[in-house]
Amino acid sequence: VAQHRLWKEIDHLVKQEVSMARLGVGECGTGWQLFAEDGEMKMYRREEEIDGMVVDPLKAVHVVKGITGHELCHYFFSPQYRYDWETTLETMQVVETIADDTLIFQQTHKRIWPASQRDCLFWSHLRRLPNDQDTEGPDMWTVVNHSTEHTDYPANTGKCVRIFLTVCLLCQTQVDPPKDGAPISRDNITCKITYCSVVNPGGWAPASVLRAVYKREYPKFLKRFTSYVINQTKNKSIMF
Ligand SMILES: O=S(=O)(CCO)c1ccc(-c2ccc(C3CCCC3)c([C@H]3C[C@H]3c3ccccn3)c2)cc1
């Protein structure tokens, strides 16, 4: 059922990204190397280059108590919160509202010396993934971001080099109801998070610099983002 011009591309890519995200790092072949660990958060990368450019795929897994997958995906998708948690952002705008669950963003990121400044243009799609019969518990939620084109924002016309990215945030909520039949509180919920990203820098940037940036920025990003959502939701009713 085509609901808008991007529907077919989005639906195909979401299904592909979600199935890959659900594969553990063991299953999807060797090559994943653990490069950062902090409590429940584990970050893996594969060292890959295209035309001499670093495009290391990243896969992070994390477990966070007190929030749901719906809440995480809501704060990740919604533009109004982005400047609060995305520290490498210089500017962000919604270029087009395709649907209430599908936006096109244009972002410029802070310049990483000595590389030139980067910008990205991507569609962002938020989706609830109904559980199949045998997996009980709340549904899974995902946000997929994928580079796209837009006539008003041609690539590489201004000072920024256009990067190409595919990102998938996949969340599964687990509820452990209290023994005494009390209502479910935030102490009874846990969210399992898988964050996958592939960023092509779009033009030359020193491999050593990029790998150092990724090593520093990705753990910081996931910790900062999850703490932000915990803080934003702690006094609010639970959004399953
Ligand atoms: O998950 S999202 O969709 C959230 C929406 O913002 C996302 C995440 C990351 C990026 C991004 C884009 C460009 C760069 C680099 C590449 C060459 C020079 C700039 C980096 C490097 C800077 C690293 C980084 C890692 C994690 C978070 C932010 N920054 C990251 C874009 C979107």
Image (tube, rainbow, N blue to C red):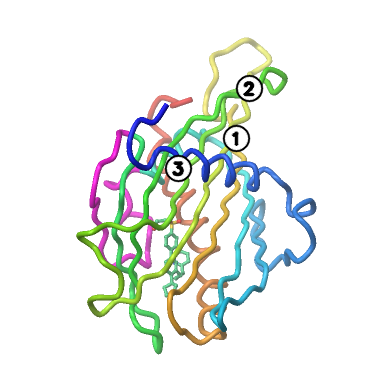
Looking at this rendering, what residue extends furthest in the bottom direction? Answer: 114
Find the magenta span and give its range.
78-100
- Tell me: residue 101, above or below residue 116: above
SS category of the residue bearing label 3: helix
Crowd tier of the residue under label 3, counting other residues whose Cα lies within 10 Å: few below 14, some 14–19, many 20 or above: some
Task: Dividing the image into four quarters, tell me where ligand 1 lies.
Answer: bottom left
Looking at this rendering, what residue extends furthest in the top direction? Answer: 181
**Residue at 57% over, 72% down:** 215
Q: Are marks 2 and 1 in contact (CB under 8 Å)?
A: yes
- Numbered tag placed on residue 10 in the rendering: 3
Mark 2 or mark 1: whose residue is earlier in sequence: 2
Q: Are marks 1 and 3 in contact (CB under 8 Å)?
A: no
The alpha-carbon separation of the residues under discs 2 and 1 comes to 9 Å
* Quadrant assignment for the N terminus: top left
Task: Report the amino acid beneath label 3.
Answer: Ile
- Tell me: residue 77, above or below residue 216: above
Location of mark 1 (residue): 172
- Expressed as whole percent of the image width and height from the top left, the position of residue 100 reads 30, 33
95 within the magenta span: yes
- Expressed as whole percent of the image width and height from the top left, the position of residue 3 reads 35, 30
Crowd tier of the residue under label 2, counting other residues whose Cα lies within 10 Å: few below 14, some 14–19, many 20 or above: few
Query: In the figure, is residue 30 to the left or right of 74?
Result: right
**Of the pair 229 and 205, the residue shown nearer to us:** 205
**Residue at 73% over, 48% down:** 24
